[in-house]
Image: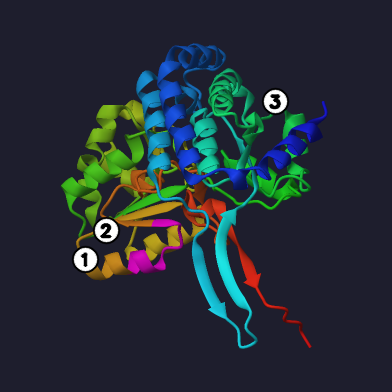
Amino acid sequence: MDFEQYFKRAAAASRLTAALTAEGRVSVLTRLAGALHEHTALILRENQRDLDRMSPQDPKYDRLKLTEDRIAGIAAEVLQVASLADPLGKRLSEKTLPNGLELLKVSVPLGVVGVIYEARPNVTVDVFSLCFKTGNVAVLKGGSDAAFSNAALISIIHRVLKEHNLDENLAVLLPPDREATAALLSARRYVDVLIPRGSQQLIDYVREHSKVPVIETGAGIVHAYFDESGDLDKGREIVTNSKMRRVSVCNALDCLLIHQNRLSDLPELLKDLAAAGAEVYADNRAKTVLDGRYPAALLHQATAEHFGTEFLSAKLAVKTVADLDAALHHIAGYSSKHSEAIVSETPEHLDRFLQEVDAAAVYANASTAFTDGAQFGLGAEIGISTQKLHARGPMALEELTSYKWQIRGSGQVRG
């Protein structure tokens, strides 16, 4: 297959985005939100074809599954993106040099944004809406698990673009095969940046093989530390919400660290997890406390492999630590630098945790479930960046822009 033609059309479409007005982009996105509601039956039917090919026990099943409520949520995020301030054409800085040259630094689109993702069809719409709002072209490479869902969603996007007499190549969906991935990784003449969304294995593969600049949206190996002064009721709600709100997402809790002097409170801390059927992999001291006070079928002895694992399911590792320093040391060794939390009533410990933990989002007495572009007021997100160059944390409109210098002169030359 000649994948180069996909990229050429995307690059050509990107040159046309400068002519789109802010009002025109809002109109398209508003119409897209309505079209998603109108075609809910189509989306659900095609999504079911994907679900029928996957075991419900697969950790990716929940990410793949769409419902009427989830489609409504996707549409709502499109409207939120549409309502946000236009990020393009911002005057970031300006000055006049002694020679009279007038310098203006202004925000502009990145250009052609490639995104490789797995079994999350909502990404198809999220990425398009963010890219379209920022004047970028989206080149999408979804996984084969969501092939039918993605095809249905891109058909709706193309329909809306045609209604507005716009090039449908503003949103390009590549075939769901490995050859398309290889082609996208090598498309540096046409694609300006590549963003992988998915497992650590996918992210590592893209980083190691891409010839296109990569922004990493890392896997989430997420910790919560329950300090010696932690409030039990507050901690139980935070741990339960961080773990169980949606177990398959990257901000879900993977490892609970508990101060050794609060081990007696561990059964109460995990009471709601037990009721929800969560499996716990506890170290020796924690397991001794939980034996007989946590369902035996759900309680397991932790091994080294359970620490530093992103479970993406109703599973949680528990480790006993001597103090805050030990918790910080463990997090530094195992964190993916995504989201980390502390539950404590000691102000000095909260401050130290917020200052010393190296992660994109660090929480004091709050659930890690809030690491989300919409929750941060950014609209839908294109991913959670765990790197430090260009963008970090939820990537939304501003992170999908770059800038250029515009220089006005009156005949100046350099000696």
Instruction: Give 194 or 299, whichever is nearer the viewer.
Output: 194
Is 354 a magenta residue? yes
Q: Is residue 252 visible?
A: no
Quadrant for residue 201, please give it: top right
Residue type indicated by callout 1: Thr
User: Which residue corresponds to mark 3?
Assistant: 175
Marks 3 and 1: in contact by CB < 8 Å?
no
Residue located at (51% from left, 24% from top) = 58
- In what quadrant of the picture does the C terminus appear? bottom right
- Residue that badge 2 annotates: 227
Q: SS of the residue at dot 3?
A: loop
Q: Which residues lie in the magenta part?
A: 352-361
Residue 31, given in percent of the width and then of the height, sits at 45, 28
Nearer to us in this view, 91 or 193: 91
Residue 346, which numbered label? 1
The reply to whether dot 1 and dot 2 touch (C-beta < 8 Å) is yes
Separation (CA) of disc 1 from disc 3: 53 Å
Q: Is residue 48 left or right of residue 272?
A: right
Compared with residue 50, is residue 292 higher up or lower down, i.e. above or below?
below
| Residue at mark 1 to residue at mark 2: CA–CA distance | 9 Å
Hey, what amino acid is under mark 2?
Answer: Asp
Local packing at callout 3 (Cα closer than 10 Å; few below 14, some 14-19, many 20+) is some
Residue at the front extreme, as displayed? 410
